[in-house]
Image (cartoon, grey):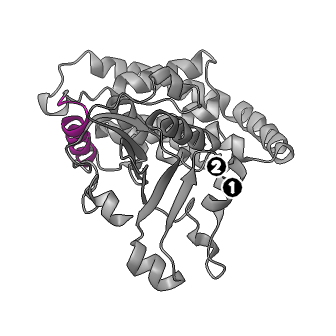
């Protein structure tokens, strides 16, 4: 299986470098955190249907399959996922772990995974730290339409959108900028990367003010954006970081699908209480943020940070 993978990918490379061989020439992105979900299984099955494969191979490359998994547990972290795989079986495989080490399930302790069918018409390379899955199509393979893939519940992303989602993984602004530029060079045909973080932050703040997004969800998003902006405005994000910290145990977004309905109902009461508690502070912080970032956007931009 490793020999087959090596004919399609470059196992020693890591993003933002080109991790796939030259026969792959079209790229889309997905959120890494969603791979243990039923929507991701549906996407794999839609891809298998399009490429006429009856299975997909999954290999974990980090932790090291031989030095870690085989040495400690006597097996490689590899699976075969059938075109008719049930969600129950897929979930069991993702959550399964060695009896001596419950923390070593694929869903938890896997940092680099690769999915590929025998035909190699497509491949998915995923890395946890930048929260990215790269879906690549082999030259000459059309693949399912964007609409067809979206019907599975997994909407393919552009490189720009994937970089926006991965922004929370970066505390070093310069490192993130360099990563983004290399991703664009290798997976977006060399399109230039433009730092639109101020515009995105303003948009989220305005959605909070308009009641178009939940307060906790919006504060969580703004908290993750603080590293994308300069030191001169970073203190404006302190209220959002504080609210995020106080509510980080509350289920927001896609993770809600994994919760028991009864437990979720109790958490929703806590979410409602917290949103009322922090409403005034969040509104004031949003107004200050919009004013500050709006004033900065009106100033000439440094060419290096564009």
Q: What residue appears at the point 61 percent right and 59 percent down from the top-left corner?
A: 94
Asked whether 301 falls inside the magenta stretch, the response is no
Q: Quadrant of residue 84?
A: top right
Q: Are marks 1 and 2 in contact (CB under 8 Å)?
A: yes
- Give 162 or 207, whichever is nearer the viewer: 162
The kind of secondary structure element at disc 1 is: helix
Q: Identify residue for label 1.
A: 89
Q: What residue appears at the point 44 percent right and 37 percent down from the top-left corner?
A: 51
The kind of secondary structure element at disc 2 is: loop
| Dot 1 crowding, Cα within 10 Å, few <14, some 14–19, many 20+ | few
Return the x and y of residue 156 as percentages of the image width and height: 45, 30
Left or right: 119 as drawn, with respect to 241: left
Return the x and y of residue 118 as percentages of the image width and height: 41, 51
- Give 211 or 48, whichever is nearer the viewer: 48
Residue 2 higher or lower than 191, as above or below: below
Report whether residue 151 is seen.
yes
Question: In which quadrant will I find the N terminus?
Answer: bottom left
Magenta segment's dominant SS is helix
Return the x and y of residue 210 as percentages of the image width and height: 60, 15
Asked whether 183 falls inside the magenta stretch, the response is yes
The magenta segment is 174-190
- Give 299 or 25, whichever is nearer the viewer: 25
Question: In which quadrant will I find the C terminus?
Answer: top left
Report whether residue 287 is seen.
no
Q: Identify residue for label 2.
A: 85
Q: Residue furthest right?
A: 262
| Dot 2 crowding, Cα within 10 Å, few <14, some 14–19, many 20+ | some
Residue 214 higher or lower than 132, as above or below: above
């Amino acid at each position: 299986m490793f020999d087959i993978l090596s004919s399609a990918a470059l196992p020693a490379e890591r993003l933002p470098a080109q991790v796939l061989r030259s026969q792959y020439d079209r790229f889309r992105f997905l959120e890494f955190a969603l791979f243990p979900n039923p929507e991701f299984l549906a996407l794999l099955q839609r891809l298998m249907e399009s490429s006429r494969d009856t299975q997909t191979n999954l290999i974990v490359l980090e932790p090291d399959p031989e030095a870690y998994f085989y040495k400690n547990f006597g097996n490689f972290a590899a699976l075969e996922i059938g075109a008719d795989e049930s969600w129950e079986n897929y979930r069991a495989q993702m959550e399964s772990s060695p009896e001596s080490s419950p923390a070593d399930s694929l869903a938890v302790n896997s940092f680099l995974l690769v999915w590929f069918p025998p035909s190699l018409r497509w491949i998915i390379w995923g890395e946890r730290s930048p929260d990215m899955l790269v879906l690549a199509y082999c030259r000459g393979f059309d693949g399912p339409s964007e609409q067809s893939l979206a019907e599975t519940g997994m909407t393919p992303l552009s490189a720009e959108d994937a970089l926006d989602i991965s922004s929370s993984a970066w505390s070093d602004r310069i490192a993130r900028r360099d990563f983004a530029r290399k991703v664009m060079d290798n997976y977006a045909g060399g399109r230039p990367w433009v730092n639109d973080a101020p515009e995105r932050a303003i948009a989220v703040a305005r959605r909070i003010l308009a009641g178009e997004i939940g307060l906790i969800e919006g504060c969580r998003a703004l908290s993750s954006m603080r590293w994308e902006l300069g030191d001169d405005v970073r203190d404006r994000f302190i209220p959002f970081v504080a609210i995020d910290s106080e509510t980080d145990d509350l289920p927001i977004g896609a993770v809600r699908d994994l919760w028991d309905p009864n437990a979720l109902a109790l958490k929703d009461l806590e979410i409602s209480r917290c949103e009322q508690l922090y409403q005034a502070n969040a509104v004031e912080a949003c107004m200050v943020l919009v004013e500050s970032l709006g004033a900065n956007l009106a100033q000439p931009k440094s060419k290096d940070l564009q």
